[in-house]
Image (tube, rainbow, N blue to C red):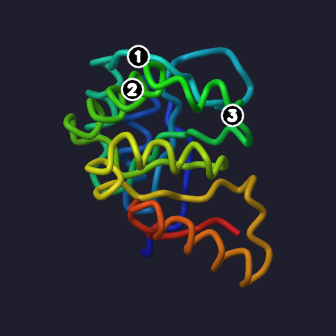
Amino acid sequence: MTPVFDVPFLPEAQYVEFLAECADELDSVHFALALSRSLDHRVRFGDAGIDSNMVSLLGRLRGPRRYLLLNSRFCSPDTLLDREGLQGLVRSMRGLLEGGVLDGIVYSDHYLLQRLADLAPDLAGVLEAVPSVNCMLNSFARIEAQLSWIRGTGFRPPARIVL
């Protein structure tokens, strides 16, 4: 069967066991950097550290791609200019990549994507940038505009997009 589902990842052992059983049907999983009770996955700036339990649990999933949610629709200019805070995010992304549990990011804010590419071109070159559903890709022109932007940043294009 062709994998078709993109599902949220929660760092809970029983849920991960269930996902592992369904791995052949999963195209990807997406997860937030920091655990929180928020209803969305706005970007958490600063060094969140890497939760070794989360890396271990993500590592149990063989097959599906793993995407970090950075899908805030807008980051303030002050935040984007905060090099130290962004470096913390980059360190967290690097730790996930080195742990073998990160294939790309889901983004909405083009300025954030560009800043990450500027700060860590080596990461951009190996990670996919996947437009969030918040980008509302409802026409070929919008899809091409997103893919063109991604190419310009140096991030890898998405393996799949959500329309």
Residue type pointed to by label 2: Gln
Query: How dense is the environment of label 2, judged by Cα within 10 Å: few (below 14), some, or many (20 and up)?
Result: some
Q: Is residue 147 left or right of residue 97?
A: right
First-in-chain label (1 vs 2): 1
Query: How dense is the environment of label 1, judged by Cα within 10 Å: few (below 14), some, or many (20 and up)?
Result: some
Disc 3 on helix, strand or loop? loop
Please tell me whether mark 1 or mark 2 is closer to you in this view: 2
Circles 1 and 2: CB distance less than 8 Å? yes
User: Residue at position x 53%, y 31% from top?
Assistant: 32
Residue type pointed to by label 3: Cys
Residues at marks 3 and 2, CA–CA distance in whole angstroms: 15 Å
Question: Which quadrant of the view contains residue 161?
Answer: bottom right
Q: Which residue is mark 1?
A: 47
In this orientation, which residue lies closer to the viewer: 143 or 120? 120
Q: What percent of the width, then of the height, locates residue 154?
A: 39, 62
Residues at marks 1 and 2, CA–CA distance in whole angstroms: 8 Å
Q: Quadrant of the C terminus?
A: bottom right
Q: Which mark is residue 75?
A: 3
Disc 2 on helix, strand or loop? helix
Q: Which residue is mark 2?
A: 87
Residue lying furthest bottom in this view? 140
